[in-house]
Amino acid sequence: MSTLTNSDKQRIENELKAAVDSLIKGCEALNMDQAFDIFWNSPEFRMIAMDGSLCDYQTYLRNNIDYLSECSNFELTTLDERVDVLTPDMAIFSWIYRAVATLRTGDKDVFDKAGASFTFRRIEDQWRVIYYHESTLPPTRI
């Protein structure tokens, strides 16, 4: 295994921040293709959802598209983030955020503090999320 320099780690950190920023922008634009492009479309992808269920890629995608299609607006605010580079081809991105979803009904779902962990692997020279874990209390409905 090769040793990573600080420069290598910083480059990887920047690449992963850009990937998560693309997810955020896609969610806020309600652009499903952009929002979920970083996730690996593979039978090997796994996710633990907010309700504690274990999901595959298709279930994860369907659940998010179903929810976001009920929204007229979606806002994400990063509260904290951290990248841990494990190898040149694998890293963990930890993200603490706030989400406000304005539903088409006019109601709002407010997730005051949520957390997500992305396990990224470089696959065919692109960073892809191979494992994702999301955690939050149920939203406050306004």
Image (cartoon, rainbow, N blue to C red):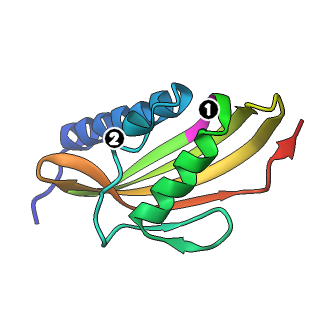
Residue drawn where x is 73% and y is 31% of the image? 104
Amino acid carrying mark 2 in the image: Leu
Foreground pick, 130 / 57: 57
Numbered disc 1: secondary structure: strand
Asked if the magenta segment contains residue 50, the reply would be no
Q: Position of residue 120 (x, y in %)?
A: 32, 55
Q: Quadrant of residue 73?
A: top right
- Mark 1, Cα crowd under 10 Å, few <14 / some 14-19 / many 20+, is some
Residue drawn where x is 28% and y is 65% of the image? 42
Report which residue position mark 1 lands on.
76
Numbered disc 2: secondary structure: helix
Measure the C-alpha gap from mark 1 to mark 2: 17 Å
Q: Split into 4 quadrants, where in the image is the C terminus? A: top right
Q: Is residue 88 visible?
A: no
Magenta part of the chain? 74-80
- Please give left or right for residue 98 compared with residue 56 in the image: right
- Please give left or right for residue 100 compared with residue 88 in the image: right
Q: Position of residue 63 (x, y in %)?
A: 56, 56
- Main SS of residues in magenta: strand
Q: Is residue 107 visible?
A: yes
